[in-house]
Amino acid sequence: MQKYKDLINKAIAAREGSYSPYSGFMVGAALLTSGGKTYCGCNIENAAFTPANCAERTAFFTAVAAGERDFSAIAVAGWPKGGAPGFAFPCGVCRQVMAEFCRPDFVIIIAAGEDEYKISSLRELLPESFGPADLA
Ligand code: THU
């Protein structure tokens, strides 16, 4: 959808910020708020491996730290450094972070290029999830 072209291009641009010396897998994400603002993130790795943060979570945590709580879509662009663009779906931890802040119809766009992408909803990628309502 042309509607998401700008978001996809922001994710591709954010991918350039990736700090991924260990995996060589560069990921960028662009998160759209319901108010129309965009927050970007990239994956950030660590010599101790475990502290690595995915691009999606970098974008979410940046937005939440800025006071945002309401989101409509995220575009993700991830493929190996110097390699051919491919589709990288969010890991399970990132899907759970999305479930904390987003409704089931939250749009997840997996992009391998401006005109090459797959669209899913959070409901599809994380069905039967555990979330804030379970603790209410
Ligand atoms: N990664 C992301 O940033 N997002 C994803 O959706 C999948 C994986 C990162 C984590 C790590 O830095 C690298 O890609 C390889 O797993």
Image: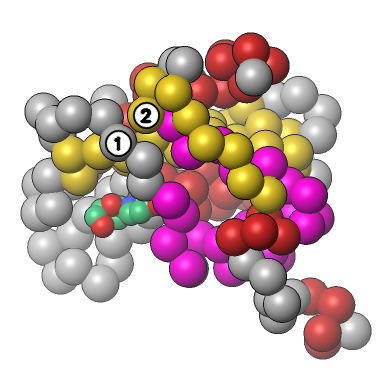
Q: Is residue 3 left or right of residue 80?
A: right
SS for callout 1: loop
Residue at the disc numbered 1 = 86
Residue at the disc numbered 2 = 112
Mark 2 is on which residue type? Ala
Mark 1 is on which residue type? Gly
Residue farthest to the bottom? 135
* Viewport quadrant of the C terminus: bottom right
Residue at x-position 52% and y-position 36%:
118
Q: Relative to residue 33, is residue 21 depicted above or below?
A: below
Choose between 127 and 66: the one closer to the eye. 127
**Label number found at residue 134:** none
Q: Does ligand 1 reach within 8 Å of label 1's beta carbon?
A: no
Dot 2: few (<14), some (14–19), or many (≥20) neighbours within 10 Å?
Answer: many
Assess whether residue 109 is covered by the magenta stretch.
yes
Q: Position of residue 43 (x, y in %)?
A: 32, 46
First in sequence, mark 1 or 2: give its number. Answer: 1
- Specify the segment rendered in magenta: 89-111
Q: Relative to residue 68, is residue 99 depicted above or below?
A: below
Q: Are marks 1 and 2 in contact (CB under 8 Å)?
A: yes
Residue 62 visible in the current orientation: no
Residue at x-position 62% and y-position 27%:
38
Asked where in the image residue 25 lies, by quadrant, the reply is top left
Residue at x-position 13% and y-position 53%:
23
SS for callout 2: strand
Identify the colour scheme used. secondary structure
Q: Position of residue 66 (x, y in %)?
A: 66, 41
Q: Is residue 8 left or right of residue 73?
A: left
